[in-house]
Amino acid sequence: MTEILAIGEFIDIPRIADPRGNLAVVEKDTIPFEIKRVYYLYDVPSGAYRGGHAHIAQKEFLIALSGSFDVLLDNGDKKEKVTLNRPNKGLLIKEGIWRELDNFSSGAICLVVSSDVYSEEDYIREYADFTASKRT
């Protein structure tokens, strides 16, 4: 099931329930892009934040594997804050969206599945540059 938000999109991750422990599966049909890179954030100190950028072309899919954290999404017109706290529900962030991650719980792990490999040229790291890009 997909839940469309004002800016982002929640996508349910298929889950196999088992008394011995659940299994969640992310495959090529789970998310709407080819997976090129996977990384994760962990041991984020209390009060710290991550993100603070937008991508020009890259799409990302965020999953809270453990714990919880908030994601602020900004498309230059609207802002939306969502909480990720379930390992079988991910957040699709399309290109051109500013994102900030904060309020990490103790032990939180954020898995990021990306549509492309790392390229510094794809980042907009200054918010003023991001808002200027939305006016053109």
Image (tube, rainbow, N blue to C red):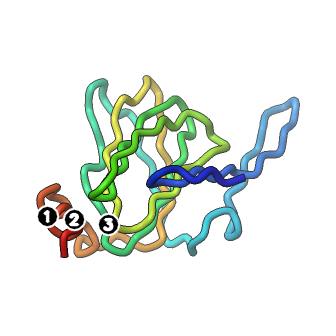
Q: Nearer the viewer, residue 72 or 46?
A: 72
Q: Nearer the viewer, residue 111 or 136?
A: 136
Q: Hey, which residue is sitting farthest right in the picture?
A: 19
Q: Which amino acid does the dot numbered 3 rest on?
A: His
Q: Which badge, 1 or 3, comes first in the chain's sequence? A: 3
Element type where label 2 sits in the image: strand
**Residue 68 to residue 8: above or below:** above
Per the image, the residue denoted by label 2 is 124
Mark 2 and mark 1 residues within 8 Å of each other at the beta carbon:
yes
Per the image, the residue denoted by label 3 is 55
Q: Which amino acid does the dot numbered 1 rest on?
A: Asp
Mark 2 and mark 3 residues within 8 Å of each other at the beta carbon:
yes
- Residue 103, horizontal then vertical, whole percent: 36, 29
Q: Quadrant of residue 132?
A: bottom left
Q: Which badge, 2 or 3, comes first in the chain's sequence? A: 3
**Residue shown at 62% from the left, 64% from the top:** 31
Quarter of the image where the C terminus is located: bottom left
- Residue 134, horizontal then vertical, whole percent: 23, 68
Element type where label 1 sits in the image: helix
Q: Quadrant of residue 56?
A: bottom left
- Residue 75, horizontal then vertical, whole percent: 33, 58
Q: Nearer the viewer, residue 92 or 47?
A: 92
Circle number at residue 79: none
Per the image, the residue denoted by label 1 is 129
**Residue shown at 12% from the left, 58% from the top:** 128
**Residue 136 to residue 79: above or below:** below
